[in-house]
Each structure stands twice: as C-alpha cells, then as structure tokens.
Amino acid sequence: ISYEEMLEMASSGAKILEMRSVELAMIYKVPLVVRSSFTDTEGTLIIEEDEEMEKVVVSGITYSRNEARISIYGVPDKPGVAAKIFRPVAEKGIIVDMIIQTSHPDGKADITFTVPRIDYKQALEIIENVAKELNAERVEGDDKIAKVSIVGAGMRTHYGVATKMFETLAKHGINIMMISTSEIKISCVIDDKYTELAVRALHEAFNLGEELFIKKEKIG
C-alpha cells in the first residue's frame, strides 16, 4: 500500500504505525515493511503510490471507538460564529475531527463535530457555555459512537465506492450519523454497538478477506 493510505489508516484508528514514522518515510522515500511478531508471513510493503495500487479500490478498513459527538443547534448563521464555537475548544487542547454544518432558511445553523471520547465531558461543558453566549437553542452529546473508515488509492479513479459503503451499512440496519470524505478515504460515524457488524460487512462487501479483519481486530 502507499504512504498516503497508511497515513489515512493511522489517522482513522488503525494502530499499526505511528503517523510520524510514516511521514518521515514518505519524505525520504524509505520503504517500510509491516510484519507480524507472531508469524513468518511476508507482511505489508509501504511505498510510493504507483498505477498498480489504483487498481485496488479499497485496501483497508479501520475503526475507532475513541469517539464522541457534540451538536449545537440554532446558532446564528453568520461569519465568526464557528470560530467562537471552536476557539475555546482548541484553547483546551481538544482535537476536533469531523465537522458538519447545516444551514436553515431562518438564518440559523446547526453544527455537529466529533472529539476524542476522553475529552467528551470537558468539550460538552465548553459548548454548553458557548451556547448561552450565542443564544443557541440547545446542545446535545453522544459518547457511544464509533468511526468506521474505508481507505484506498483506487477511490481516485473508481466511482460508486461511497454508494457501496452506504448501501452495505443500510443493508445491515446501521444508521449513518456523520460522513467525511477525502481523496482516498470515506469515514462514517455510527452507533458504537454496530462497530463489529459494520467492519465485517464492509470487509465482505469489498472482498478484503477474514485474515485482514483479524489483524485489524488485534490492533484496535
């Protein structure tokens, strides 16, 4: 797989390699080999992307249960409001991941974002205080969520990947709360209780095999 794919996997919850090690390898074009400490299998080679890699649409699936979601409803839909919401969160050193904003005809907006579960209570308290300042309608939070992601360089050149992911989750009765995309990654926030089902279903849908799933389970 490519350096970019490995970085996306690492950022999505796959505890295979530290992101910094992959970044350095990518900068200096150093090939990496990830091998099991329990078997003598060849492992996975991480190198620069080439044309062959794009033939594989999805190369891996990751998940993270270290997630929480916070929503603030009915804030003014005008410049500077988002900054007012996220500045105090950043000042406390809390990392914000996925962000969704929905605007309404009445000049109001709803903003939903995710944070690490360990920071959930502190972030929720901050947003509740911000909501008072902005005269927001209400604040809601949920720390029983998970983020499931599919990663693959082939997404750049293949269509219908997102549709296949969404249809697979729907087929198993799994509701999608949030969606985030990049060139080579699609992430969905779902109810935490469906994490294992979602990962197994996506592995089957994209023909990744049981062996890869077991590896992901071991590394979290």
Image (cartoon, helix red, strand yellow):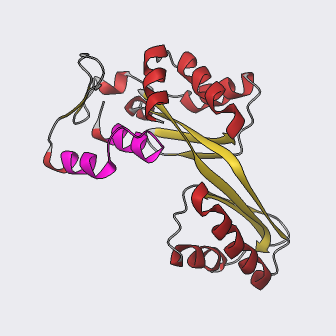
| Displayed quadrant of residue 53 | top left
Image coordinates of residue 13 in percent, x first then y, are: 47, 43
Along the viewing direction, whichever of 79 and 141 lies nearer the viewer: 141
Residue at 28 percent across and 17 percent down: it is: 39
Horizontal side of 112 relative to 36 (left or right) equals: right
Image coordinates of residue 81 in percent, x first then y, are: 67, 78
Asked if the magenta segment contains residue 17, the reply would be yes
Q: Can residue 209 be seen in the rendering of this structure?
A: no
- Vertical arrangement, residue 136 with respect to residue 184, above or below: below
What secondary structure is the stretch in magenta mostly built from?
Answer: helix
Residue at 19 percent across and 45 percent down: it is: 25
Q: Can residue 147 be seen in the rendering of this structure?
A: yes
Along the viewing direction, whichever of 186 and 192 lies nearer the viewer: 192
Along the viewing direction, whichever of 209 and 157 lies nearer the viewer: 209
- Vertical arrangement, residue 132 with respect to residue 156, above or below: below
Which span is picked out in magenta? Answer: 4-26
Horizontal side of 211 relative to 106 (left or right) equals: left
Residue at 61 percent across and 21 percent down: it is: 201
Extreme-bottom residue of the structure: 133
| Displayed quadrant of residue 126 | bottom right
Extreme-front residue of the structure: 38
Asked if the magenta segment contains residue 24, the reply would be yes
